């Protein structure tokens, strides 16, 4: 009786296995073979975006004595140099918008400004620190960040970046909760420092 039972179990297992193998084989045959011409693939290039683009690239957490900051990639898709002014290349003064409304700017020292440029087809990284936010945005608020740049196409006759810059902005995005928390801590420390400072 036990031998008969084992034979039946073996037969069922063999039948099920053969059915699965047949099913997998039929599905595998339906998948088309994609043949890539290696020489052609190596010579093809992706389409590059035209114009100047400001793209939010996430948050960089605090490291050591450096506080957290937001990262932006500025891509120059024009045929000329894009110019801008800043004290340090990665930290030009930003314009901040909350749900489409411009936020008040912090007090800034503009001495020691220098002119920088982004070559055609090249990207640069800009950074925005927590000190730019005088208030903590609410969860879900949309933030837009703009930077003043000189478009070489519409301002090709200009020699200096500061002559006639225009604002280029990112798409709206939501701040990470961790960055909102850093803003809250920063503003709390700033308020305590202002309160303790002699008038």
Image (cartoon, rainbow, N blue to C red):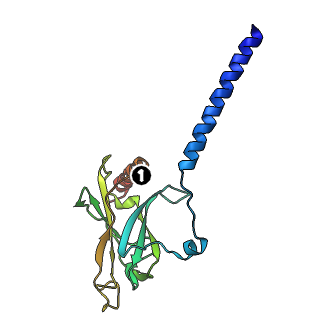
Residue tagged 1: 179
Question: Where's residue 127, x and y in %?
Answer: 43, 66
Instruction: Classify residue 135 as left or right of residue 179.
Output: left
* Quadrant showing the N terminus: top right
| Residue occupying the point 55% across, 57% down | 63
Q: Residue furthest right?
A: 3
Instruction: Classify residue 106 as left or right of residue 116.
Output: left
Instruction: Classify residue 33 as left or right of residue 193.
Output: right
SS for dot 1? helix
* Quadrant showing the C terminus: bottom left
| Residue occupying the point 73% across, 17% down | 7
| Residue occupying the point 31% across, 71% down | 168
**Above or below for 10 versus 48:** above
Question: Where's residue 25, x and y in %?
Answer: 60, 43
Q: Quadrant of residue 72?
A: bottom left
**Above or below for 5 versus 85:** above
């Amino acid at each position: 009786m036990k031998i008969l039972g084992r034979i039946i179990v073996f037969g069922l297992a063999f039948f099920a296995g053969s059915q699965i193998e047949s099913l997998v084989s039929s599905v595998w045959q339906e998948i088309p073979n994609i043949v890539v011409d290696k020489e052609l693939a190596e010579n093809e290039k992706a389409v590059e975006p035209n114009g100047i683009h400001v793209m939010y690239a996430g948050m960089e957490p605090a490291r050591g004595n450096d506080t957290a900051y937001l990262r932006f990639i500025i891509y120059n898709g024009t045929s000329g140099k894009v110019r801008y002014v800043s004290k340090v290349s990665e930290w030009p003064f930003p314009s901040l918008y909350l749900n489409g409304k411009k936020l008040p700017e912090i007090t800034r020292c503009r001495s020691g400004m220098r002119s920088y440029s982004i070559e055609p087809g090249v990207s640069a990284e800009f950074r925005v620190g927590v000190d730019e936010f005088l208030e903590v945005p609410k969860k879900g608020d949309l933030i837009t960040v703009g930077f003043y740049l000189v478009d070489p196409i519409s301002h090709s006759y200009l020699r200096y970046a500061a002559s006639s810059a225009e604002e280029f902005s990112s798409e709206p995005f939501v701040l990470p909760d961790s960055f909102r928390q850093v803003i809250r801590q920063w503003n709390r420390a700033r308020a305590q420092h202002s309160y303790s400072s002699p008038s």
